[in-house]
Amino acid sequence: AQKITQTQPGMFVQEKEAVTLDCTYDTSDPSYGLFWYKQPSSGEMIFLIYQGSYDQQNATEGRYSLNFQKARKSANLVISASQLGDSAMYFCAMREGVWSASKIIFGSGTRLSIRP
Amino acid sequence: DSGVTQTPKHLITATGQRVTLRCSPRSGDLSVYWYQQSLDQGLQFLIQYYNGEERAKGNILERFSAQQFPDLHSELNLSSLELGDSALYFCASSVDGKGGQPQHFGDGTRLSIL
């Protein structure tokens, strides 16, 4: 069965440091996609980055990169040079299949707080 | 601004009532998704529509129903409301229903049941 685990309920990081948010997943489908979303205190959900199970390279989007380790079933989000505006909840999510009627599941989230 | 519009932003009602939440997807997006976010359950996928047809179903209660209209906007109907239905309801849209497409979320409708 699909499962997403985020083991860090909260993290504190000093401004300008890099931070890694952990995400492990479980699926029996060889085709799947992994997503990261950011939810600031204002409540909106912001798409950050996507990694497909067949992608050969780790996804990157600006200061965000996804450390995809397929054999370990992990998809950690790395934020380089953290900023005060990065303080938010971060959710990892997974969807099985490429053209799929499967549901999308989200992890429980990690609350990231950036210290000045 | 994600381009996804949800109305209303806030809704306060009583137990036993029925409400309708509305979502307009981003221009060009054919697929609409509904999610419920509550403190105890986290972010739960409810249902997905693609070009008017139901595509995937998650943890949606029988008291809840949704549809996507020919103009692609979607409505989520919640009936016989209970205190536990208080939550933030998100709509998201994507270009198509493909698994790898990112979903763009609206700002949500906060539903409070008194």
Image: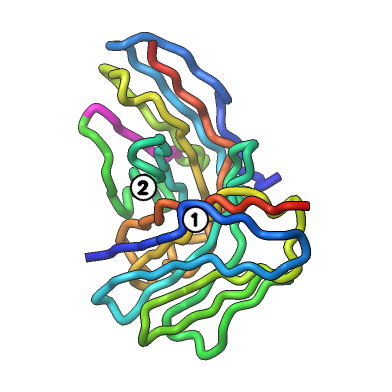
Above or below, B20 against B15 in this view is below
**Picture disc at residue B45:** 2
SS assignment at label 2: strand
> Which quadrant is the C terminus of chain B positioned in?
top left
Q: Residue at x 30, y 71 (%)?
A: A26
**Picture disc at residue B55:** none
Instruction: Please report the bounds of the magenta region as a residue range.
Output: B63-69
Image quarter of residue A13: bottom right
Above or below, B39 against A49 in this view is above
Residue matched to label 1 = A91
Residue B84 spot, x, y in % from top left:
31, 24
Residue B89 spot, x, y in % from top left:
45, 34
Left or right for B73, reference B53: right
Residue type, label 2? Phe
Density class for disc 2 (Cα within 10 Å; few <14, some 14-19, many ≥20) is: many
Query: Most extreme residue toward the bottom, as rendered?
Result: A56
Q: Residue at x 47, y 74 (%)?
A: A75
Q: Nearer the viewer, residue A10 or B96?
A: A10
Q: Is residue A55 found inside the magenta-colored segment of the image? A: no
Q: Is residue B65 found inside the magenta-colored segment of the image? A: yes
Residue B61 spot, x, y in % from top left:
24, 34
> Which quadrant is the N terminus of chain B positioned in?
top right
In this rendering, does residue B30 appear at all? Answer: no
Residue type, label 1? Phe
Chain of the residue where label 2 is placed in the rendered structure = B
Cα separation between marks 1 and 2 = 13 Å
Above or below, B16 against A84 in this view is above
Left or right for A31, reference B3: left
Main SS class of the magenta portion in the image: strand
Q: Nearer the viewer, residue B92 or A46?
A: A46
Density class for disc 1 (Cα within 10 Å; few <14, some 14-19, many ≥20) is: many
SS assignment at label 1: strand
